[in-house]
Amino acid sequence: MLRREIPHHEQAGRVIRLSRSMLAPAPLSGSDELTPLQPFQPWTEQMQPLCYWDDEPVALLVESQAESSWIDGRQWMSELSTGWFSLLSTALQVGAWLENHRFCGRCGAPATKLTAEFAMHCDACGHRNYPRISPCIITLVTSGEAMLLARSPRFPPGRYSTLAGFIEPGESAEEAVHREVFEEVGVHIDQLRYHQSQAWPFPHSLMFGYFAEATTRRIRIDGVEISDAAWFSPRQLPSLPPPYSISRELIEAHLARWR
């Protein structure tokens, strides 16, 4: 459904209106449902050509203030089918980049938005800025069928998830898995197995998903990023992350092995 080709030659199409993580709803033709895609319309210079959706060109309009009827990106993702995730993820990440890089990071002069690629160009010094992508690891630690899940102080009540963290400069993804797991819960691991990746638009992460087997089971939480952690069996699970997340994908893949 999503075609990753920037429609820079198009002059009209669908539009996504975005402010921070809020997206404007529009009525879905012939239905009472809502869509984040605005009707086909002429594009203005303020709009960023984004992609094609169902072969229709789509542009992004970043606005300074959301209206009261706008819906948060996470809510859109939870209510729409999983096929929409790639479109919303792209819009949210490009929108955050456009909002945060209006000026050159080298000399401070105003930057010019290019249309044929995702780039902001500085006419003053020639520096060109591209969307920021922050590599992260996310890991499901297991011990046989048991899963080590943890909760952040920012989570909704009762929710537990897999362990995650940013990859540091000079560090491989596998080194980051070992470091993050030990820092957050004090557990040693081996048998790392890469599963898959996911672009995570809050605001610009690229998640590398791993499985790892624990060699120790005693938990020691850091008390900062992690407020609680525990081992859970497939028959007794807490509230889990939403289905569109790679964390949930890791958990479901592990559960499928033990059914």
Image (spheres, helix red, strand yellow):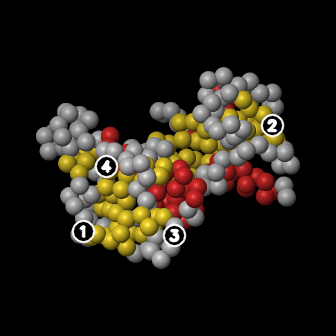
Sequence-wise, which precedes: disc 2 or disc 3? Answer: 3
State which mark lies toward you, 2 or 3: 3
Per the model, the C-alpha gap separating discs 1 and 2 is 54 Å
Q: Marks 3 and 1: which is nearer the front? A: 3
Number of disc labels: 4
- Location of residue 107 (image quadrant): top left
Which of the two residues, 256 or 67, is positioned nearer the viewer here? 67
Q: Earlier in the sequence, mark 4 or mark 2?
A: 4
Q: Distance between the residues labelled 2 and 3?
A: 43 Å
Decide if residue 142 is in sight here.
Answer: no
Q: Under tag 1, what secondary structure?
A: strand
Residue ID for mark 1:
42
Q: Dot 4 surroundings within 10 Å: few (below 14), some, or many (20 or more)?
A: some
Badge 2: residue crowd in 10 Å (few <14, some 14–19, many ≥20): some
State the CA–CA distance, disc 3 to disc 4: 26 Å
On residue 63, the disc is 4
Q: Which of disc 1 and disc 4 is earlier in sequence?
A: 1
Disc 4/disc 2 C-alpha distance (Å): 44 Å
Label 1 Cα neighbours within 10 Å, binned few <14 / some 14-19 / many ≥20: few
Q: Is residue 75 above or below residue 214?
A: below
Mark nearer the viewer, 3 or 4: 3
Q: Which amino acid does label 3 sit on?
A: Asp
Q: Nearer the viewer, residue 223 or 183?
A: 223
What residue does disc 2 label? 231
Q: Name the residue under label 3.
A: 32
Nearer-the-camera pick, 41 or 69: 69
